[in-house]
Amino acid sequence: MKFKLIAEYFDKLEKITSRIQLTSLLSELFSKTDRDLLDKVVYLIQGRLWPDFTGLPEIGMGEKYLIKAIAMATGIKEDEVERTYKSIGDLGEVALSLKTKHNEVNILSFIKAPEKTNELEVKEVYDDLAKIATSMGGGSRDIKIRIFVGLLKKASPLEAKYLVRFVEGRLRLGIGDATVLDALAITFGGSADYRPIVERAYNLRADLGNIARVIANDGIEKLKNITPIPGIPIRPMLAERLADPKEIMDKVKGKALVDYKYDGERAQIHRSGDDIKIFSRRMENITAQYLDVVAYVKDYVKSKDLIIEGEIVPIDPESGEMRPFQELMHRRRKNEIHEAIKEYPVNLFLFDLMYLDGKDFTNEPILNRRRALEEILETNDKVHIASHIIVDNVTDLMNYFYQAISDGSEGVMVKSISEESVYQAGSRGWLWIKLKRDYQSEMADTVDLVVVGAFYGKGKRGGKYSSLLMAAYNPEKDVFETVCKVASGFSDQELEDMQTKLESLKRADKHPRVVSQMVPDVWITPSLVAEIIGAEITISPLHTCCKNDRGGLSIRFPRFLRWRDDKSPDDATTNLEIQEMYSKQLKKVEEKSIDENI
Ligand code: ATP
């Protein structure tokens, strides 16, 4: 399979934004893809070489090296490449333009015809890119450049454009996971009817390449029997939110398992023999940050073939009390890990089990999963099962809620214990409902929104970013719709850090997955997620979230609370959740006015 085909499809994909067209083009590409390359092509479309959770490095070659490589591959002087870059502002386009020029010069001067005989193969491109990504240590820079120059020399102008974009980490095809799933279902199942099967498989094994490999080797029917395997993260089950305990009890049909809701870092722990891995809420491999937790699992969990889930919480070693979750941030800095492990000890509170000794537990009711978890665990002062009770009335629920809060928890997780209470990987449903401490605000909960644009400040903050255009995720359309512009809640340090955070994400035009009427000073590639609290949700003509004839939904007086590095843009609060919060708020206002009128 020639890389030319991929470059041509990238070129077409880049020019369209309609989800339907994207899916059908992608499906066309999949049907032309060699089966043994399907997984690699899926990764390339996502602008990566392998899934994040492998912890393997991606390429990310800086501008300077790319300029050098383009110069070496085309024989054009570096300063001319730089000049062209300054005028075009996009290294992919620079590569396309200079390769075209180079080929023309070659033809005119009869030096040689552009290399046609030796067209790039997809496998060769992938293998070379993988070599570039993984070469480390002394001399690796030269090796990386040499390999890349080799690729660029063989590439056609269009191929060069996409090779450069890929290596730069800016492929910008605007294709989310959901679109890839649709295209796989259509191509190999013949219709969108296969979408739920492909999606379920992806929820249990959050690796699109793995799913593509199963389809390529065994056919799409095999996806029906897919089970989780240790080593590939499961997409986490998520909770709905409600503020009214009576409504909660109704939703769980009168009886529930109620857990403390711990405020720490969600941890999905996989063990296969002596290999223990910990994945975060957004399925990144965070094992290195929690070597102490790895040791707890080795010492206190009996099985060697499992996937379990819990919350890692910082603990005061003296009093045993829970500490603010921000303390876990110290563990993000690689060179301070060993110090941080000593200085900020943690406990593990386990709340679920999804796989044990070869058996898929995701389809088991929650009480079976909990029992299995309890059986393999030797609890002690470091490893616990989440504190819980079973309740069948509002009074018991609320008493337990107050106890949870006075013990330093955020609230409780109310979990249905019906026969249908399976582990719903990758979805937010009413089987789990969170009831949190009140935020002293009209809004019952905070929301997690994606940064899609930024505005410069005035006066003292002139020339620096000082407010952000925030968006919710629309999973149906796989786009981000704006909800508010947030300008308050940032500390001086956070504002300072924001400048660097945004710099590498800024872009000249709106990202294809962003739907916005507002035009910010700078567009930002959707990547950063922030937790926002506001006074209330209102209808606004300025925003595009849940937009209809009356306008969109927006958050009034939004305030930044913190960055949510543990969430990816697709994990942000959805348009439907905002819609639901808005409806709840209306209901609350109605009830209040009825009460006041009585
Ligand atoms: P979400 O994960 O639902 O998108 P979020 O990350 O903003 O939301 P919260 O709204 O605070 O977090 O609640 C969900 C999180 O609560 C879970 O992702 C998990 O990390 C945490 N949690 C703490 N205790 C429990 C528990 N006993 N059962 C399930 N989740 C728990």
Image: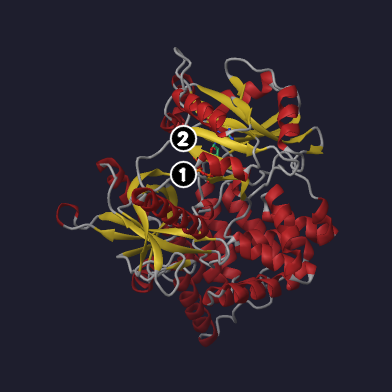
Q: Is mark 2 within 8 Å of ligand 1?
A: no
- Spatial distance from mark 1 to mark 2, Cα to Cα? 10 Å
Residue 425: x %, y % from top left: 67, 47
In the picture, residue 363 is in which quadrant? top right
Front-lying residue, 98 or 114: 98
Q: Residue at x 56, y 42 (%)?
A: 248
Q: Quadrant of ligand 1?
A: top right
Q: Residue at x 47, y 19 (%)?
A: 342
Residue 202: x %, y % from top left: 69, 53
Kind of residue sitting beneath label 2: Arg
Front-lying residue, 23 or 554: 554
Q: Residue at x 32, y 45 (%)?
A: 497
Kind of residue sitting beneath label 1: Asp
The answer, for residue 469, to whether it is visible in the render is no
Local packing at callout 1 (Cα closer than 10 Å; few below 14, some 14-19, many 20+) is some
Residue position for label 1: 565
Q: Earlier in the sequence, mark 1 or mark 2?
A: 2
The answer, for residue 144, to whether it is visible in the render is yes
Vertical arrangement, residue 310 with respect to residue 487, above or below: above
Q: Quadrant of the N terminus?
A: bottom right
Vertical arrangement, residue 274 with respect to residue 280, above or below: above
**How many badges with numbers are in the image?**
2
Residue 157: x %, y % from top left: 54, 76
Q: Determine which of the numbered discs, if any, sits on residue 323 in the image.
A: none
Pair 1/2: label in front: 1
Q: Are marks 1 and 2 in contact (CB under 8 Å)?
A: yes
Residue position for label 2: 332
Residue 79: x %, y % from top left: 36, 67
